[in-house]
């Protein structure tokens, strides 16, 4: 019952995801969540940590195709996408498949050649798994979260416990 929420890979943060290892797996496309994955949640501000921006640049140089997929509002997501120079899909309604399908169209990659990176089991990992993407769970950057996210984190913490996964901020 909980297997659908199990990530294929854990990483403490985006900068620590091994690009060579992904490439060796045949991964060519990467879809990235925004809030608490690429940056901390700040009202109206898109502040991407230096190591995250450096990782994105490295991935691009390595030949990966990247895009952003977020359930957030277009205005906010566009700010982060602009900083990183990536195409984006906002209001993606993860874990539903529609946003991921559009992301795959943008990237031009097959599901099995695509990784999805995010900090939430109930949206990022579940959505990626049901689409057949290679799911990577990262630790959330900051404990500051939207009210809705705080509620879903309660459910998530139960699932994490059942799957033997580490806590939200210590993946
Ligand atoms: Mg997130």
Image (cartoon, helix red, strand yellow):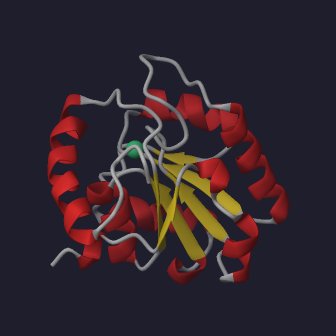
Quarter occupied by residue 41: top left
The residue positioned 54% from the left and 46% from the top of the image is 88
The residue positioned 16% from the left and 46% from the top of the image is 154
Please tell me whether residue 83 is drawn above or below residue 58 in the rendered image.
Answer: above
Q: Outermost residue toward the right?
A: 61
Marker count (numbered): 0
Quarter occupied by residue 146: top left
Q: Is residue 35 left or right of residue 18?
A: left
Please tell me whether residue 72 is drawn above or below residue 43 in the rendered image.
Answer: below
Residue 168 position, x and y percent, is 35, 47
Q: Is residue 34 left or right of residue 80?
A: left
Which quadrant holds the C terminus?
bottom left
Q: Is residue 108 left or right of residue 149?
A: right
In depth, the one of 79 and 47 nearer the eye is: 47
Residue 142 position, x and y percent, is 43, 32
Please tell me whether residue 3 is drawn above or below residue 78 in the rendered image.
Answer: below
Q: Is residue 36 left or right of residue 13?
A: left
Residue 70 position, x and y percent, is 42, 46
Quarter occupied by residue 17: bottom right
The residue positioned 56% from the left and 49% from the top of the image is 13
The residue positioned 43% from the left and 34% from the top of the image is 74
Please tell me whether residue 164 is drawn above or below residue 3 in the rendered image.
Answer: above
In depth, the one of 83 and 120 nearer the eye is: 120
Q: Report the image quarter containing ligand 1.
A: top left
Which quadrant holds the N terminus?
bottom left
Residue 133 position, x and y percent, is 47, 75
């Amino acid at each position: 019952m909980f297997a659908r929420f199990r990530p294929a890979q854990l990483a403490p943060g985006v900068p620590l995801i091994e690009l060579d290892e992904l490439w060796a797996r045949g991964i060519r496309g990467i879809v990235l969540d925004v809030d608490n994955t690429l940056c901390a949640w700040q009202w109206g501000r898109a502040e991407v940590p230096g190591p995250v921006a450096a990782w994105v640049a490295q991935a691009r140089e390595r030949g990966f195709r990247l895009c952003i997929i977020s359930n957030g509002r277009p205005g906010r997501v566009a700010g982060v996408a602009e900083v990183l120079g990536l195409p984006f899909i906002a209001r993606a309604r993860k874990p539903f498949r529609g946003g991921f399908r559009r992301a795959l169209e943008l990237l031009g990659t097959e599901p099995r050649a695509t990784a999805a990176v995010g900090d939430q089991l109930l949206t990022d990992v579940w959505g990626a798994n049901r689409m057949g993407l290679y799911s990577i769970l990262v630790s959330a950057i900051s404990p500051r979260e939207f009210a809705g996210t705080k509620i879903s984190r309660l459910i998530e913490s139960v699932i994490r416990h059942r799957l033997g996964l580490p806590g939200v901020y210590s993946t």
